[in-house]
C-alpha cells in the first residue's frame, strides 16, 4: 500500500494531457470478447482499472497485447471459461460488463459480486432485467449465474433506470442477438456513444446513437475493429479543479469541447476563469465564488464523478454552496475528513452537503481515499492546505488517474509516493 505525501500551498502551473476515457475503455474491452478477430484500441488510459479488465480478458482465454501501454490488441478465438476470476471481479465494478459477451459467446455467465466503489450500494438490477428481456435466466444465488442455452433473443425494453453500465450491458448483449433490439430510456453519456460506434465498426447495426432510444440489429458473427478513445472529460475536470484550488494556471489537452462543456459551465458559475482555446482547456488564476446549488444529473448535466472535487473547490469559494448528488449515496461521506483540516462542512444527508468558504485548510492529517473520486478530491485539498497531508492508499486513486505522481510533480506540486 502506498501513501501520497503532499506539501501544500504551492501554485500549480503548466500543461497536462488527458488520456482516453476510463468509462469508455472498460465496455470497449468487454466488446472485444464478442469476436474471434483482433480488435485494436488506442489512446487507452494507463490506469489500474484498465489493467484489471485486461487481466480478466486474459483469464477468459483472450490474447491481450500492450497491457500498461496506450495501445491494446485483443484477440479471443476461444472463450475458455464463462466464470472469470472472482478476485479480479471483486476489484472492478466494470466486470459486470462481461455478462453480455459471455452469454453471447458461450450461453452462460457466472460472475462474483462486482467490486469497485461502494459495491454494496450499487445495484446491477438494471443489467439483469435487460438480459432477462433477451432470454437469459438468472439463478438466485450470492453470485450472478446466468444461462441462455438457446442464445440471446432481440427484445423491446424500457430501462427502469438510465444506468450507463446497464445500457452498455444491453448493447453488448444485443450486438449478437437475433433480430432488432430496442432500448428505451437509455443512457446518453459520451462513453455510451463510443461503445455504439465501436459495435457499428464490428458489424452490428446501431441507430439512435446519442439519443435515449437505441436500436441494435444483431449480427450472428462480428468482426474485428479499431477505435481511438476520446479524451477523458472527468480527468480533464479533475485537473481543472486542481489548478483552480491552488490559484494556478493549467492548460489541459485532449478533452473534446462537447464533453468538457458540462464541467466548464459549473466552474464558470464559481467564477473560475476557464475556457477552451485551440483545443486546449485553459484554467487561469481565479477567486472562486459560491453558487447557491450544484446538482448532479444524467448527461448532459453535471457529472456525479466530479461532485467530490467541486465540493473541495467550494471550501475555497466565497459564500455558501449546497452540493446535491442525488445519484449515489456515500460519495460525499469521505469529505467529512476535511473538517479536521478546517473546512466548514455540514453533511445534511447521504446526498447533500453544505459548504461555507473560504476557509484556510490545514495539513498534518492522514486522509483515507475510500473511493477513486473522493481520493482525488482529498489530494486537491492537500494541495491547497498549509503544511503536509498524507492520502492513502494511493492505489485507489491510481485506478483512474495515469502517472498521477509524475504529472502532479510536472505541474509544480510538492508530492512524493511513499511505500
Image: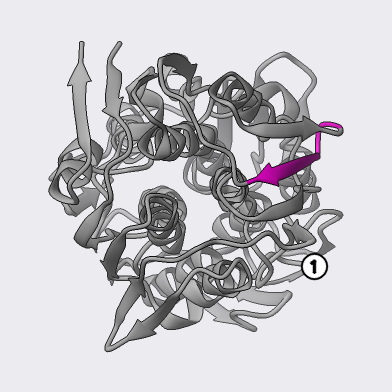
What x and y, as percent, mark residue 195?
47, 65
- The colour mode here is one colour
Count of residue discs: 1
Residue nearest the viewer, comparing 367 with 170: 367
Q: Is residue 375 above or below residue 303?
A: above
**Magenta range:** 349-357
Q: Residue at x 47, y 72 (%)?
A: 260
Locate residue 40, reporting x and y percent. 22, 61
Q: Is residue 416 visible?
A: yes
Q: Main secondary structure of the magenta part?
A: strand
Q: Would you say residue 219 is visible in this rendering? A: no
Q: In what quadrant of the picture does the C terminus appear? A: top left
Residue sitting at x 75%, y 15%: 141
Label 1 belongs to which residue? 185
Q: Position of residue 110 (x, y in %)?
A: 57, 25
Q: Is residue 351 magenta?
A: yes
The answer to which image quadrant residue 80 occupies is: top left
Name the residue rendered at 53%, 44% in the picture.
97
Q: Is residue 135 above or below residue 7?
A: below
Q: Residue 240's x, y, as percent?
A: 40, 60
Considering the numbered disc 1 on the image, is that residue within a helix, a strand or a loop? loop
Q: Please report the residue visible at 42 percent of the width from the left and 64 percent of the height from the top.
A: 221
Is 398 within the magenta? no
Left or right of residue 381, residue 407 in this image: left
Q: Nearer the viewer, residue 247 or 92?
A: 247
Indicate left or right for 37 with 313 as reference.
Answer: left
Decide: few, some or many residues near mark 1? Use Cα within 10 Å; few <14, some 14-19, many ≥20. some
Q: Quadrant of the N terminus?
A: top left
Please identify the quarter of the rendering in which residue 202 is found: bottom left
Amino acid at each position: 500500500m502506498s501513501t501520497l505525501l503532499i506539501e501544500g500551498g504551492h501554485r500549480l502551473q503548466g500543461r497536462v494531457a488527458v488520456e482516453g476515457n476510463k468509462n469508455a475503455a472498460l465496455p470497449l474491452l468487454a466488446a472485444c470478447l464478442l469476436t474471434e478477430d483482433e480488435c485494436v484500441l488506442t489512446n487507452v488510459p494507463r490506469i489500474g482499472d484498465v489493467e484489471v479488465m485486461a487481466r480478466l480478458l486474459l483469464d477468459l482465454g483472450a490474447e491481450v497485447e500492450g497491457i500498461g501501454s496506450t495501445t491494446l490488441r485483443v484477440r479471443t478465438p476461444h472463450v475458455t471459461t464463462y466464470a472469470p476470476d472472482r478476485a479480479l471481479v471483486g476489484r472492478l465494478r466494470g466486470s459486470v460488463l462481461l455478462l453480455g459477451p459471455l452469454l453471447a459467446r458461450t450461453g452462460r455467465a457466472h460472475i462474483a459480486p462486482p467490486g469497485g466503489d461502494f459495491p454494496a450500494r450499487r445495484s446491477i438490477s438494471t443489467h439483469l432485467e435487460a438480459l432477462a428481456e433477451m432470454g437469459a435466466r438468472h439463478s438466485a444465488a450470492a453470485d450472478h449465474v446466468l444461462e441462455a442455452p438457446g442464445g440471446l433473443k432481440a427484445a423491446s425494453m424500457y430501462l427502469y433506470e438510465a444506468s450507463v453500465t446497464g445500457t452498455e450491458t444491453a448493447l453488448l448483449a444485443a450486438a449478437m442477438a437475433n433480430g432488432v433490439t430496442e432500448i428505451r430510456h437509455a443512457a446518453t453519456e459520451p462513453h455510451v456513444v463510443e461503445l455504439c460506434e465501436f459495435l457499428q465498426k464490428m458489424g452490428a447495426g446501431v441507430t439512435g446513437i446519442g439519443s435515449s432510444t437505441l436500436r441494435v440489429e444483431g449480427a450472428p458473427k462480428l468482426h474485428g475493429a479499431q477505435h481511438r478513445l476520446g479524451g477523458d472529460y472527468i480527468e480533464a475536470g479533475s485537473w481543472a479543479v486542481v489548478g483552480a484550488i491552488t490559484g494556478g494556471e493549467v492548460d489541459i489537452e485532449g478533452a473534446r469541447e462537447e464533453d468538457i462543456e458540462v464541467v466548464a459551465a459549473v466552474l464558470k458559475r464559481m467564477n473560475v476563469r476557464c475556457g477552451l482555446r485551440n483545443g486546449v482547456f485553459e484554467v487561469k488564476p481565479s477567486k472562486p465564488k459560491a453558487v447557491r446549488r450544484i446538482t448532479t444529473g444524467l448527461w448532459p448535466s453535471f457529472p456525479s464523478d466530479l461532485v467530490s472535487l467541486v465540493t473541495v473547490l467550494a471550501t475555497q469559494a466565497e459564500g455558501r454552496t449546497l452540493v446535491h448528488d442525488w445519484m449515489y449515496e456515500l460519495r460525499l461521506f469521505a469529505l467529512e475528513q476535511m473538517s479536521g483540516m478546517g473546512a466548514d462542512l455540514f453533511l445534511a444527508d447521504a446526498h447533500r452537503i453544505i459548504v461555507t468558504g473560504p476557509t484556510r485548510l490545514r495539513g498534518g492529517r492522514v486522509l483515507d481515499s475510500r473511493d477513486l473520486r473522493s481520493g482525488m478530491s482529498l489530494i486537491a485539498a492537500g494541495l491547497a492546505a498549509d503544511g503536509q497531508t498524507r492520502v492513502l492508499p494511493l492505489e485507489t486513486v491510481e485506478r483512474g488517474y495515469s502517472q498521477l505522481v509524475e504529472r502532479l510533480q510536472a505541474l509544480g506540486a510538492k508530492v512524493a509516493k511513499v511505500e
